[in-house]
Amino acid sequence: MSEKLPSREEALEFLRKSGCQPNVLKHCEAVAALALEMAEAAKKKGLPVDLKLVEVGALLHDIGRGKTHSVHHAIIGAQIAESLGLPRPVVSIIKRHVGGGITTGEARKLGWPKGIYVPQTLEEKIVSYADKLIEGSRRVPIDVTIQGFSKELPPTTIERLQRLHREMVSLVGDCKCLP
């Protein structure tokens, strides 16, 4: 990656300056810890994964929560990241981490700008999946997340999340990090 990634400390400072509360920082740190364990497991299997990008992207994935706790935190977070001059791959992680991804049709209904909101790269998928396994700052099984999402999201979203789960288990399934 040609653009310089911020350090862990710089990423945490960006979260604080954007208005994120201590509980959001704890959540982001928990997601980063799990995502990094998953990325290391993928790397051990020979997959090309950028560990630093995973860590920084996971730390910053909820930077938009300093402004809103709605689903729009992904878009607002991406805008904040762009205004900070963060590298494009970090911006993409932020805007693609919600649920198992947001389809073009769903994004249109939400009034989001044209774009791709489903995780595409291995780093984006790892961060999105790790986020689904952290409730507050504790690790939870994917079944807990799916059960919670099923109460408020359509079946197509649940299916997308289940596909992401299957893909991640196939990539890092022997990782002791998965709850």
Image (tube, helix red, strand yellow):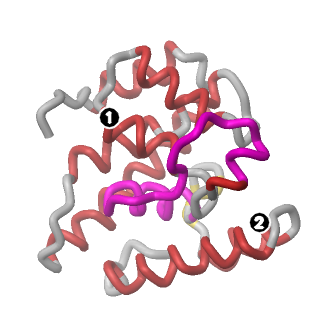
Specify whether residue 23 is painted magenta: no
Q: Which residue is mark 1?
A: 88
Q: Position of residue 116 (x, y in %)?
A: 50, 49
Residue 163 position by quadrant: bottom right
**Marks 1/2: CA distance?**
29 Å
In the structure shown, which secondary structural element does the residue marked by tag 1 occupy?
helix
Q: What percent of the width, then of the height, locates residue 72?
A: 69, 36
Quarter of the figure with residue 112: top right
Q: Is residue 6 above or below residue 58?
A: above
Highlighted magenta segment, given as a residue range: 106-132
- Residue to which mark 2 is pinned: 149
Q: Percent from the top left, x then y, of residue 160?
A: 61, 73
Indicate the position of residue 73 as horizontal and vertical percent values.
65, 34
Identify the residue at image location x=50%, y=19%. Answer: 16
Whether residue 116 appears in magenta in the rendering, the answer is yes
What residue is at 68 percent from the left and 47 percent from the top?
Answer: 107
Q: Residue at x 54, y 29 (%)?
A: 77
Indicate the quadrant containing the N terminus: top left, top right, bottom left or bottom right.
Answer: top left
Residue at 79% x, 67% y is 148
